[in-house]
Each structure stands twice: as C-alpha cells, then as structure tokens.
Amino acid sequence: MNLELYFAPGACSFVPHAALEAVKAATGQAFEPRLVKLHKGEHRTPEYLARNPNGQVPVLVVDGKPLDQIVAIIDFLDRGFPNAGLLPLEPWARAQAMSQLAWMNNTVHPTFTHVFRAADFAASEDAQAEVKKIAQAKYRQCLERIQDWVAGARKFWYGDQITAHDAYAFTLLRWGGYAGIDPKSLPGYLAYVERVMAAPPVAAALERERVKLDTYKPATS
C-alpha cells in the first residue's frame, strides 16, 4: 500500500502524522510525508484543491486516492492496521473512543478556531475581541475536561500504546498557548503530554514538524 500524508507543521494534521508513525513502528508500513506550506497558500492551489476541495490539511492519499477529515483517516488506519492499536478493539470501547475523538475534532477544534481566527466570525474589532474572549473561556473548559479524562491514565490515553487521542491531546494543549492558557496551569494534562511527547512515534513526528510545546507567552505589563 502506498500512503502519502499532506501535513502542515503544528496543524491538526499532527494527529494522523503521529498515527502513521505508530503504524510504521508496529507494522513496518511506510508513508511519504508531504509538507504543505500554509503561509505560502499551497493549500489553495488547484493541484491541492483537487485532493481536498476544502483547502485544508490533513489529506491522506492511499494508492492515489485522497481521504480527508481526521476521524475518517484514523478510522481507516485503525481498520487497515489493527496491530497498531490506534483504537480499542472491543466494540463498545471503540465506539466510546470514536465519540471522544469526534468531540475533540468537532467541538474543541472549532472552539480554538474562534480564538485564533476571530475575524472569520465577527466584523468589528470589538466584536472580534468578544468572540475571542468567550472562546478562550470555553476552550479552557474543554482542556479541563481532557485533563479529567487522562487523570487515571497509566501512561497514555489507552494504556501503553500511543493512539490518535494522545496526538490530538498534545495538539490541543499546544494550541492552548495561543489562547493564553499556560500549560502549567493544567498540571495533570501537562505531565501526561510530556509522556506522550517522549513516545518514539510522537517524537518522530515532532522532529519532522519541528514543533514543541512552546506557544504560551506570559503577558507583559
């Protein structure tokens, strides 16, 4: 099988990026990383839009056929490479895991978008500031919920194997810095993410993307 991942450093495409590294470690299945430079508008070129009309990352190209949307990509990888352990095998546990993954993708992620791109949701500067303020508070609540979920984790979200949930949890905490949230204010979450970052599949993706948990900048007086 030929796999290509179109990704952008620090974006949500980190989730399938780390998942593919986990698949590679567990099964030997290689993939070709394809860097998309968002700041240069490469996601808006006709060539890229032919792969994903939404003009977004990630896109996983499987034997020449494109697949977008994180939840769909992770579902495909889990079904195709069950030995990688990306999702639980037991049907009810798997459904619960998919529910959590969908929530991170369709609730937490869009909440951050309201922080990061408030101008997409309001015209005036005052209205944008209000959108951002409300979204920041909601985003912290989301991160606190994730902290509660991982509080009892032995090592990673589902035990000793890295999953898509772990990669998404890292990404969301990293984005929290852009929302003015100090990761140290979520100590349980931070300790868990530090373990995640040290796992070889995640570390490989981090090295390729050249990103760290360094987005939080304390306010200066």
Image (cartoon, helix red, strand yellow):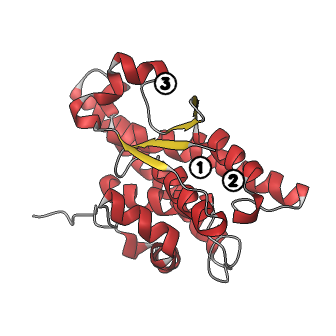
Residue 88 position (above or below residue 200): above
- Mark in front: 2 vs 3: 3
- Horizontally, is 118 left or right of 190 in the view? left
- Horizontally, is 60 left or right of 73 in the view? left
- Horizontally, is 153 left or right of 18 in the view? right
Counting every numbered tag in the picture gives 3
Residue positioned 48% across, 67% down in the render: 202
Measured as percent of width and height from the top left, residue 58 is found at 48, 39
> On residue 100, which mark appears?
2
Residue type of the residue flagged with mark 2: Gln
- Tell me if residue 199 can be seen: yes
> On residue 170, which mark appears?
none
Q: Are marks 3 and 1 in contact (CB under 8 Å)?
A: no
Give the residue at the far left of this rendering: 221
Q: Secondary structure at mark 3?
A: helix
Nearer to us in this view, 101 or 161: 161
Q: Secondary structure at mark 1?
A: helix
- Tell me if residue 180 can be seen: no
Residue with the mark numbered 1: 104
Residue with the mark numbered 3: 51
**Badge 2: few (under 14), some or many (20 or more) residues near its Cα, within 10 Å?**
some
Residue positioned 31% across, 53% down in the render: 178
Distance Cα–Cα, label 2 vs label 1: 6 Å
Measured as percent of width and height from the top left, residue 168 is found at 53, 57
Residue positioned 46% across, 48% down in the render: 32
